Image (tube, rainbow, N blue to C red):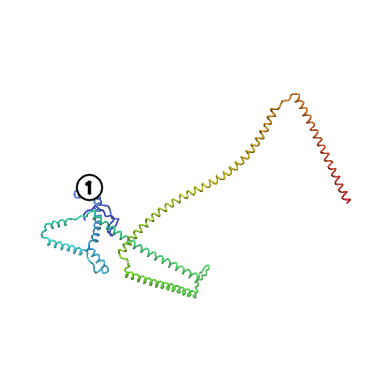
């Protein structure tokens, strides 16, 4: 194969490793024009490494084209089928080179027949043969088609391998679950056996176990009966499943006779419908995710508004209590204002009366003031005298009351004695 522009790094044969694939190095167009004597050792090593990488990439590309040729060539396909059929008998093997030789011989025979039929156009045929002998280079579209087909086939192989290993993983998981169940069953049976049939006698130095033989025999008989019952259940289940299988087989035969069996076209239509429904389901799932996100946002906003409402309600309660307190204070202030107004009216009245008295008041003369002062002193002396006289009279009244009380008591005693 000649040098190509496409680097098949992703589409390789199954025998090649992906780690070995490297990008195509930049090589000079004419290696003969290089002067190797003037080049340094490092430049020569780099050139050699580039040539190695270039050759490795070309080998990988050739493997890819060869595998495509083997898949598309009808003779090679027949040969592969024969090899597939003769895999079981290793003695009957077919050689690839012989098949290719036969194919080339058939091509030559066809060319000779054409030459015999068209003797007049020998010159044109010679030109055509000369053109055919020239190396045919692949176009970019052909290379892309080959790589695309190789990519699709590789994808199919990966999917098949995935399905295969998923089935293997499921089988291994089922086996592990069965083993776990058996282990739990055996541990349970061992625990029950040790609990029911072993009687341990512990001492400081020795530890002995005693087993009751009758109980042991009975235990094994019960276990065998249980196993027989399980076997019977499994047998009945197997028979029912066989009956169901036969019924389904008869229904399938009836459908085949009636022509209700799905053909390949129907299956393809069902696959297309399934893909359409899956696309619709994906769309619905994306819409559902969007709706869930919007619902989450709305819930967040609603929670914010709820918190704001709770804060506002708390503030409202506080303001309500403050308003009630302010109303009480206002009513008290109103009552105090009424009292103050009444007191103000009274004070104004007294003030007016005092003003009138002040206006009407006339200062007495000096002799009148002296006379009034003398009269006041005399009246004060009389008041003191009268207070003293009142005290003396009170003392006499008290003494007389005591005497009167004594007389009353003596009279009561005499009356009581007379009666």
Which of the pair 350/402 is nearer the observer?
350
How many other residues sit within 10 Å of disc 1, few (<14), some (14-19) or many (≥20)?
Answer: few
Q: Position of residue 171 (x, y in %)?
A: 37, 65
Residue furthest out toward the top = 366
Residue furthest out toward the right = 418
Q: Is residue 146 left or right of residue 127?
A: right
The quarter of the picture where the N terminus appears is: bottom left
Which of the pair 266/52 is nearer the observer?
266
Q: Is residue 196 left or right of residue 5?
A: right
Dot 1 falls on a residue whose secondary structure is: loop
Q: Is residue 58 left or right of residue 373?
A: left
Q: Position of residue 152 (x, y in %)?
A: 29, 58
Q: Is residue 337 left or right of residue 375?
A: left
Which of the pair 408/354 is nearer the observer?
354
Which of the pair 374/163 is nearer the observer?
374
Choose top left, top right, bottom left or bottom right for residue 402: top right
For the point 22% across and 47% down, which residue is it? Answer: 39
Q: Position of residue 323 (x, y in %)?
A: 57, 43
Above or below, 365 relative to 114? above
Q: Position of residue 381 (x, y in %)?
A: 79, 31
Q: What residue is disc 1 on?
A: 39
Q: How many marks?
A: 1
């Amino acid at each position: 194969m000649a040098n190509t522009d496409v680097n098949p790094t992703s589409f390789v044969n199954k025998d090649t490793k992906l780690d070995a694939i490297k990008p195509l190095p930049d090589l000079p167009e004419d290696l003969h024009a290089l002067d190797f004597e003037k080049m340094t050792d490092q430049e020569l090593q780099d050139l050699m490494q580039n040539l190695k990488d270039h050759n490795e990439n070309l080998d990988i590309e050739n493997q890819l084209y060869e595998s495509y040729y083997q898949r598309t060539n009808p003779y090679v396909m027949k040969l592969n089928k024969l090899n597939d059929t003769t895999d079981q008998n290793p003695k009957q093997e077919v050689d690839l080179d012989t098949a290719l030789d036969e194919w080339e011989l058939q091509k030559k025979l066809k060319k000779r027949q054409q030459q015999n039929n068209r003797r007049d156009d020998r010159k044109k045929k010679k030109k055509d043969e000369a053109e055919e002998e020239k190396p045919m280079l692949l176009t970019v579209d052909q290379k892309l088609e080959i790589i695309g087909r190789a990519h699709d086939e590789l994808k199919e192989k990966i999917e098949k391998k995935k399905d295969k290993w998923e089935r293997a993983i499921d089988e291994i998981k089922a086996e592990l679950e069965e083993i776990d169940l058996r282990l739990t069953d055996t541990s349970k049976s061992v625990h029950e056996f040790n609990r029911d049939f072993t009687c341990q006698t512990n001492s400081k130095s020795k530890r002995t176990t005693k087993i009751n033989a009758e109980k042991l025999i009975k235990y094994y008989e019960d276990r065998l009966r249980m196993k027989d019952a399980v076997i019977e259940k499994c047998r009945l289940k197997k028979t029912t499943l066989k009956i169901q299988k036969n019924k389904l087989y008869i229904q399938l035969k009836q459908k085949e006779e009636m022509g209700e069996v799905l053909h390949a076209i129907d299956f393809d239509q069902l696959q297309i419908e399934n893909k359409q429904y899956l696309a619709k389901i994906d769309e619905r799932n994306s819409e559902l995710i969007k709706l869930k996100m919007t619902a989450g946002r709305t819930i967040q906003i609603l929670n914010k508004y709820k918190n704001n409402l709770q804060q506002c309600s708390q503030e409202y309660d506080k303001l309500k209590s403050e308003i009630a307190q302010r109303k009480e204070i206002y009513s008290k202030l109103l009552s105090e204002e009424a009292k103050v107004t009444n007191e103000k009216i009274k004070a104004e009245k007294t003030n007016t009366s005092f003003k009138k008295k002040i206006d009407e008041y006339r200062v007495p003369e000096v002799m009148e003031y002296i006379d009034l002062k003398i009269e006041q002193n005399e009246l004060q002396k009389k008041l003191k005298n009268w207070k003293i006289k009142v005290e003396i009279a009170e003392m006499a009244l008290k003494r007389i009351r005591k005497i009167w009380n004594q007389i009353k008591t003596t009279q009561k005693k005499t009356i009581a004695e007379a009666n």
